[in-house]
Amino acid sequence: MDYLAFLLAILYLYKARCEEIFWDTTVKLAKNMSLECVYPSTDTLTQMEWFKIKQLERESIAIFNPTYRVILREPYADRVYFSNLTMTSNDMTLTFHNASEVDVGFYSCFLHTFPHGTWEKVIQVVPSDGFEIAVPSNSHTVSEPGKDVTLTCQPQMERLLQEVMWEKIQPHQIDLLTSCNLSQGRSYTSKYPRQILSNCTQRMRRAFLTMPHVTASDSGLYRCGFKASTGETETFMMRLTITNSKTNNQYILFVAAGAVLLLLVFLITTAIVVSRKRKRRRQKRGLFKKEYWDTQNRATNNYRSPAPASQPSDGAGEDIYVNYPTFSRRPKTRV
């Protein structure tokens, strides 16, 4: 019996080591990082606890009870804290400061609620150099707040699909939105804190993701991934932008008003320049005409009075042109 029990224990350990942990969110290791855990329901929270998942055990990090409040375990007491925790809050986000390589691994946010029982979210912390960087998007969708948005993607490969996955990509973390096992026709319930609708049927060739009543927080980069029965994979990146129509209209009006103002300034400036040019031309034509008639009069009279008797003393009869030519007032000598 002892030998048989020993063999069973070995098989159990082997199975535990080989079993793959399924996680909801991947977070990039940072000196100050937050592990987001927001319970999406309005159930009554009776108790919650954060664990670090190791191969054969779970190491307790922190525990919260509405009656007894917060207890931080060693050696995490000086390195972790609850970011947004209140008596009525469903946000159990745990924040690390001075995190290091020893904090890489899997974490569990485990809640006891009433009346639905337990709820768990698993988070994987990976090294910063191993974090997957988002690639440029293949398409861009723009919508307004309050509307329903549907993202679709269709694989190019002709292989029989085995799995379809939707994720939201952020600079510091990747959230699993939905995962569908096509061979079993079964989808995984995401821990993402918003309502999401997607299709999951055998032999489907097109995947969609619907988010009802979108808000500005839904803007971002989304990834649709396919996995064939042969192991072949294919991914598509889609960017979603939620804009405020009122803000856009105000911006458009502001830009239009600015353009009209610039046009008016340009037209006024052009009119002033043209008016000045025309005035100068008229002045030049008047000057040349007066010079011509003065020359003709001098040729006819063949003399000029040295000092006209009726010339006003206050200069009221002087010409306004500053460039008017002057002539000598000395009388000609008769021979």
Image: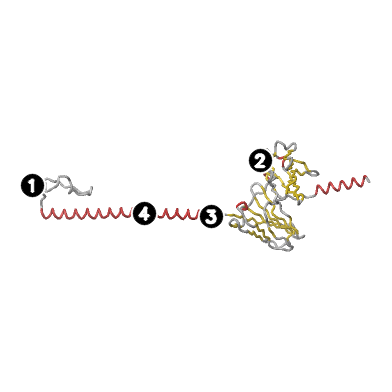
Q: Do callouts 3 and 2 mark residues in contact (Cβ within 8 Å)?
A: no
Q: Do callouts 2 and 1 mark residues in contact (Cβ within 8 Å)?
A: no
The mark nearer the N terminus, 1 or 4, is 4
Q: Which residue is mark 2?
A: 32
The mark nearer the N terminus, 4 or 3, is 3
Q: Which residue is mark 4?
A: 268
Mark 3 crowdedness (10 Å alpha carbons): few <14, some 14-19, many ≥20:
few
SS at mark 1? loop
Mark 2 crowdedness (10 Å alpha carbons): few <14, some 14-19, many ≥20:
few
The mark nearer the N terminus, 3 or 2, is 2
SS at mark 2? strand
Q: Position of residue 321 (x, y in %)?
A: 22, 49
Instruction: Please identify, in this view, whether the residue under mark 3 or under mark 2 is nearer the observer.
Output: 3
Mark 4 crowdedness (10 Å alpha carbons): few <14, some 14-19, many ≥20:
few
Marks 4 and 3 sit apart, C-alpha to C-alpha, by 33 Å
Q: Which residue is mark 1?
A: 333
Q: Is residue 306 left or right of residue 51?
A: left
Q: Do callouts 4 and 3 mark residues in contact (Cβ within 8 Å)?
A: no
Out of 179 and 306, give the one closest to the viewer: 179
Out of 92 and 97, give the one closest to the viewer: 92
The mark nearer the N terminus, 3 or 1, is 3
Type of residue at label 2? Asn
Which picture quadrant has residue 92?
top right
Q: Position of residue 313 (x, y in %)?
A: 15, 45
Instruction: Please identify, in this view, whether the residue under mark 3 or under mark 1 is nearer the observer.
Output: 3
Q: Residue at x 39, y 54 (%)?
A: 264
Type of residue at label 3? Lys
